[in-house]
Amino acid sequence: MHKKHNILITAIGGDIGQAVARVLRRLDIVDRIIGTDMSDDHAGRFFVDRCYTVSRADDQGFLGQLKALVEKEHVDFVIPISEPELKVMHQAQQDGTWDASQLVIPQGNVVSICLDKFETIQCFKKAGMSTPWTQLVQDGDPPEVPCILKDRWSWGSKSIVMIQDRDMARLYARYRPNALFQELLLPDEEEYTCGVFRSNIGQIATVAFKRALTGGYTGKAVVVQDESMQKLCTRVAEVLNLRGSINVQLRKTVQGPMLFEINPRFSSTVLFRELIGFRDVLWSLQDLLGEKPDLTFSPPVGVRIYRVSTEKIVNAKKEYV
């Protein structure tokens, strides 16, 4: 019988944290789930056994608060969800102030490269892969329009703006100097999100969804199997020396599939993936435990998945810790 583990999830107030919690509830190696968030007004508490409020990731007290909770709740693994928290905890792992075996985050060069959308493109361009042209706003007008503008460091797709002409590019450049211009990859309807997992011994599993965005996140998706995308995702894992799970976003163009960014964390499709047998949360935990994950996976091509919402009502007199 497996030992059961206590797991802490950050940013439990958001949809990804809640999806990860729902995945963990399905695993027989999980005992208690602890959630943290910088707000105390959210539905995340319905998905965990205990919920706490912590400081922002950029507050100097954040790591100390998290460590205190890990000790108090006898936490075995921590899963950072928000990118600011991921950045801080990755740095703590790098400088030796946090045990790497406790953090469920991608290893290798993943976090340091992929949190920066500009460096992501430069990395794969140097590796000889096809990438969209990408230019920092501070370097002048984009080489062609229309194109897109997006933040260099951001989460989700809400910051993306379609730039129609150079006058518009110059206007946005004044207000978003840390953004970047990027090639508009067409057609719009050929956008895919791909889960990629690579174990400590180099086993790789991938899954691809053709998706439609709703509010910056995947609202619905259909499972596809495409050899060119599978090869691209495998190459990404090798270039990054990945250990763990990431999410590759790409569009399929007339030149073939072209990645435009990578999320170095579990993505909003993490529950989608679990439901069709791509169990990257479980595999990540097993890999950290020194076990060999069973990556046997056959994508159920054509299966459609839809994101739905629900409601929770809390009595005004109800108190939570």
Image (cartoon, rainbow, N blue to C red):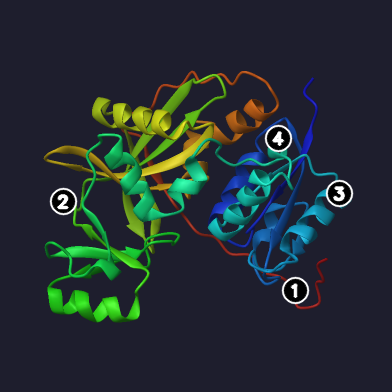
Q: Which residue is mark 4?
A: 101
> Would residue 277 be visible to someone looking at this image?
no
Closer to viewer: mark 2 or mark 1: 2
Closer to viewer: mark 2 or mark 3: 3
N-term-proximal mark, 4 vs 1: 4
Q: Rounded to the nearest whole Å, what is the CA distance between mark 2 and mark 4?
A: 41 Å
N-term-proximal mark, 2 vs 4: 4
**Measuring 22% from the left and 49% from the top, which residue is drawn there?**
132
Q: Is residue 226 above or below residue 178?
A: above
Label placed on residue 71? 3
Q: Is residue 241 above or below residue 156?
A: above
x and y percentages locating residue 4 in the rendered image: 79, 32
The amino acid marked with disc number 3 is: Glu
Q: Is residue 53 above or below residue 190?
A: below
> Would residue 116 be visible to someone looking at this image?
yes
- Side (left or right) of 129 relative to 81: left
How many neighbours does mark 3 have within 10 angstroms: few (below 14), some (14-19), or many (20 or more)? few
The amino acid marked with disc number 4 is: Ser
Q: Rounded to the nearest whole Å, what is the CA distance between mark 3 and mark 4?
A: 15 Å
N-term-proximal mark, 3 vs 4: 3
N-term-proximal mark, 3 vs 1: 3
Assign the C terminus to one quadrant of the image: bottom right
SS for dot 2 = loop
Residues marked 2 and 3 touching at CB (< 8 Å): no
The amino acid marked with disc number 1 is: Asn
